[in-house]
Every structure is written in structure tokens, then in C-alpha cells.
């Protein structure tokens, strides 16, 4: 079950805090709501810096309608979540772990090539790290406004049976359109 939207079209400007916010959403909210309570095998969120697309994704998800509702409720979750110093630090560490994870030589070469091709300099990466380290709870609140605006215009893609889609459509306020049954 995937849902995504182009955030740059909504006026969002990339800021390194999005890495911390993604870590917070993925390891807390989505894990609890979609994985633990909803029964999906996994749930993720991500942001493409070059494309501006923010996505929510779950897999082997038996609760399509509830998962979509959880995705839409993420903005409210970010507005109301208690983000103390310990929670913030934990998620900053998680974001840095992903940004600067250990790589073998072949992966380092691939990453270097990819950064070169998109024009990302060492100075850009350092600015991103500084923004990650400077993330505050206010960044979470500001990003909640962007997600709220994106919820209504996001696109949904579901890979699954026609029966699962039909069952979910009985629960959704706006039915999903079936374009192809796999």
C-alpha cells in the first residue's frame, strides 16, 4: 500500500530535518500503527530530494483502509507528538546513521557517482548534516503542515488482489480506482 505526493509543488523547500522526521515517523508511528497494530510485515516513509516526492509504503498489508487512514493521520501525529530531548537525540542519531552509514569500497564509489551526477557537493552534504543536527520539535510541526496539504492530493497505489481492493473500497470515504488486477 503506497501513498505519495510531490512536496515541492506545495512550496516545501528541502531541509535536512526531514531525515530526522522520517526516522521518527518510520520507527515510531508507522511501526506502531501499521506494523504492530495493523499486521503489515513492514512500513516505511521516504523523501526523494531530487524529485520532491514523499512516500509512505507498507508491504504484505492486510488492512489497506486503516493504513491509508494512518498515512493521512501522520500530520496530526507530528503536531501532537511529545518530542523531548531524548526522543529528538535518538532520531537525530538514526538519521545520521542512514546518511553516513558504513560502505564498502564499491558502494562508496556508487554513492560518489550518484552525488556527482545530481550535483551534490561535499558542502551540500555538510549543510544537510548541520540541519539534521540542528533539528528542533518546531521542524516537526512545520512539516506536519506540508503533510496535511499533501494528503488530499497524494496518489495511492495498491498492489494486491481485486478482492482486497473491493473490501477496502467499502471502508474508504473516496473509493480507489482499480486499474489492473495482478
Image (cartoon, rainbow, N blue to C red):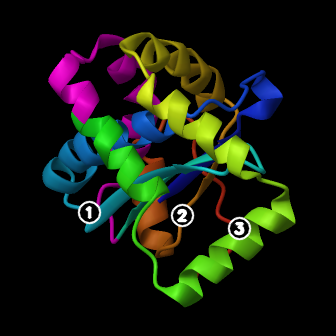
- Which badge, 1 or 2, comes first in the chain's sequence? 1
- Which badge, 3 or 2, comes first in the chain's sequence? 2
- Residue placed under numbered mark 2 in the picture: 158
Taking depth in this image into account, of 1 and 76 the one nearest to the observer is: 76
Q: Which residues are magenta?
A: 60-89
- Residue placed under numbered mark 3 in the picture: 179
Question: What secondary structure is found at the residue carrying circle 2?
Answer: loop
Label 3: how many Cα within 10 Å (few below 14, some 14–19, many 20+): few
Considering only vertical position in the picture, is 179 above or below 11? below
- Which badge, 3 or 1, comes first in the chain's sequence? 1
* Left/right of residue 147 with respect to residue 64 in the rendered view: right
Q: Which mark is residue 40?
A: 1
Q: Do tag 3 and tag 1 residues touch (Cβ < 8 Å)?
A: no
Question: What secondary structure is found at the residue carrying circle 3?
Answer: loop
Foreground tag (1 vs 2): 1
* Left/right of residue 6 with respect to residue 95 in the rendered view: right
Considering only vertical position in the picture, is 182 above or below 21? below
Q: Do tag 3 and tag 2 residues touch (Cβ < 8 Å)?
A: no
Which residue is painted at 40% across and 16% down in the image? 136
Taking depth in this image into account, of 139 and 166 the one nearest to the observer is: 139
Taking depth in this image into account, of 88 and 1 the one nearest to the observer is: 88
Q: CA distance from mark 3 to mark 1?
A: 23 Å
Amino acid at each position: 500500500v503506497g501513498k505519495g505526493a510531490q512536496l515541492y509543488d506545495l512550496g516545501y523547500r528541502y531541509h535536512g530535518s526531514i531525515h530526522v522526521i522520517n526516522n521518527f515517523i518510520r520507527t515510531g508511528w508507522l511501526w506502531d500503527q501499521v506494523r504492530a497494530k495493523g499486521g503489515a510485515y513492514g512500513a516505511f516513509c521516504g523523501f526523494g530530494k531530487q524529485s520532491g516526492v514523499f512516500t509512505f509504503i507498507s508491504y504484505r498489508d492486510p488492512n489497506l483502509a486503516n493504513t491509508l487512514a494512518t498515512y493521512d493521520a501522520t500530520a496530526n501525529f507530528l503536531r501532537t507528538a511529545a518530542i523531548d530531548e531524548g526522543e529528538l537525540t535518538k532520531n537525530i542519531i538514526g538519521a545520521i546513521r542512514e546518511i553516513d552509514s558504513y560502505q564498502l569500497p564499491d558502494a562508496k564509489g556508487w554513492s560518489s557517482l550518484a552525488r556527482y551526477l545530481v550535483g551534490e557537493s561535499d558542502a551540500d552534504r555538510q549543510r544537510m548534516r548541520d540541519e539534521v543536527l540542528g533539528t528542533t520539535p518546531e521542524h516537526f510541526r512545520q512539516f506536519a503542515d506540508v503533510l496535511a496539504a499533501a494528503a488530499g492530493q497524494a496518489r495511492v497505489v495498491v498492489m494486491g488482489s481485486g478482492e482486497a481492493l473491493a473490501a477496502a473500497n467499502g471502508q474508504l470515504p473516496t473509493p480507489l480506482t482499480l486499474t489492473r488486477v495482478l
